Each structure stands twice: as C-alpha cells, then as structure tokens.
C-alpha cells in the first residue's frame, strides 16, 4: 500500500469520526447551545465546521505519513498510531459529553485528557516523521482554545 492510499484511508477514518460527532452536535446547536452564556471570544457557529474539517485533513495526512514508515519502524509506528486512535476517540467523545449529555464540566475534564493525548501523539509522530508531528500543532492549539472556551462556558453557566 502506498503513502497516498494510507493518507486517504486515514482521511476517511478522521472524517467519519468528525461526522459521527456532528450528528450529536448539530441538534444541540439550535436548541441547548444557543441558551448558554458564552464568553466574548466565542467564535461564530459557522467557523467550527471548516476549522474542524481542515484539522481532520491535517490529522489524516499526519497519520498517513507515520503509517507509511511501518516497514522501517514497525513498533514505533504501531505505538504512535495507537495513541492517534486514542486521541481520535477522545475527540469524538467530547462532542457526546458536551452536546449530547449537555455536560460542560465532564467535557472539560475529558478535553484536558484529550489535549494530553494529542501532545503524546505529537511526541510519537515527530520522532517518526517531523512533518507529521508539525501537522498536529494547529490541532493542539485549536483544542487548547476549545478547552478555554469549554471552561468559560462551564464557569458562566
């Protein structure tokens, strides 16, 4: 399997996770989320879909680049991709906690764990492929911002 095929498979997985999370998010946006007090720095709702789509593409390319090194660094790649799958799962779970259960406090605890897992994935990826590691930086920054936003919403409500 070549690098492009691996990236495409990773992209399908990432976008599927994003889509599954959106099925919980969308119904709550117009009902529950609009009723919350939000901080002044809360972005407009329309910005989230393009940002997340872009981040899922970056994540998929990063995973595909790491996966492409499976023959040279078998165990390291398996470990790195294991962390990638853990953080991807946590990524989806956040939407279920925040929008599905409508529980910003539980989502805040979970997003802290998510950020740590993304950082650990970054550390694993950068040892295998520097570009793959760098591609996770915007994701780490966005999730850090999302954690601050999540904490602010919890505090204000």
Image: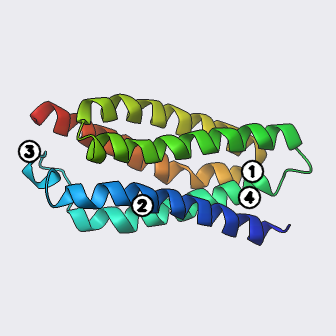
What residue is pinned by disc 2? 52
Spatial CA distance of label 1 from label 3 is: 42 Å
Spatial CA distance of label 2 from label 3 is: 23 Å
Asked whether the beta carbons under mark 4 and mark 1 sit within 8 Å of each other, the answer is yes
Report whether 24 appears left or right of 151: right
Q: Residue at x 44, y 58 (%)?
A: 20
Specify whether residue 101 is in view.
yes
Q: Residue 19: horizontal and vertical position, in percent?
A: 44, 63
Q: Is disc 2 surrounded by few (<14), some (14 to 19) or many (20+) residues within 10 Å?
A: some
The residue tagged with tag 3: helix, strand or loop? Answer: loop
Spatial CA distance of label 3 from label 4 is: 41 Å
What residue is pinned by disc 3? 37
Q: Residue 115: horizontal and vertical position, in percent?
A: 46, 36
What residue is pinned by disc 4? 65
Q: Residue 60: horizontal and vertical position, in percent?
A: 61, 60
Report whether 124 appears left or right of 12: right
Q: Residue at x 60, y 60 (%)?
A: 13
Could you say which disc has been placed on residue 129 in the image?
Answer: 1
Q: Residue 84: horizontal and vertical position, in percent?
A: 62, 44
The residue tagged with tag 1: helix, strand or loop? Answer: loop
Spatial CA distance of label 4 from label 1 is: 7 Å
The residue tagged with tag 2: helix, strand or loop? Answer: helix
* Badge nearest the viewer, 1 or 3: 3
Q: Is disc 4 surrounded by few (<14), some (14 to 19) or many (20+) residues within 10 Å?
A: many
Which is nearer the N-term, disc 2 or disc 1?
Answer: 2
């Amino acid at each position: 399997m070549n690098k492009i095929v691996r990236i495409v498979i990773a992209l399908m997985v990432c976008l599927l996770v994003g889509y599954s999370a959106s099925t919980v998010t969308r119904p709550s946006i117009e009902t529950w989320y609009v009723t919350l007090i939000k901080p002044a720095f809360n972005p407009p709702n329309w910005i989230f879909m393009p940002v997340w789509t872009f981040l899922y593409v970056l994540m998929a390319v990063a995973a595909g680049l790491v996966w492409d090194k499976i023959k040279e660094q078998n165990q390291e790649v398996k470990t790195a991709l294991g962390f990638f799958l853990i953080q991807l799962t946590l990524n989806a779970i956040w939407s279920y906690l925040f929008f599905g259960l409508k529980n910003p406090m539980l989502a805040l605890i979970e997003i802290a764990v998510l950020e740590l897992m993304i950082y650990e994935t970054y550390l694993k990826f950068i040892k295998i492929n520097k570009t793959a590691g760098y591609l996770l930086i915007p994701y780490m920054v966005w999730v850090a911002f999302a954690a601050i936003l999540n904490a602010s919403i919890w505090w204000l409500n």
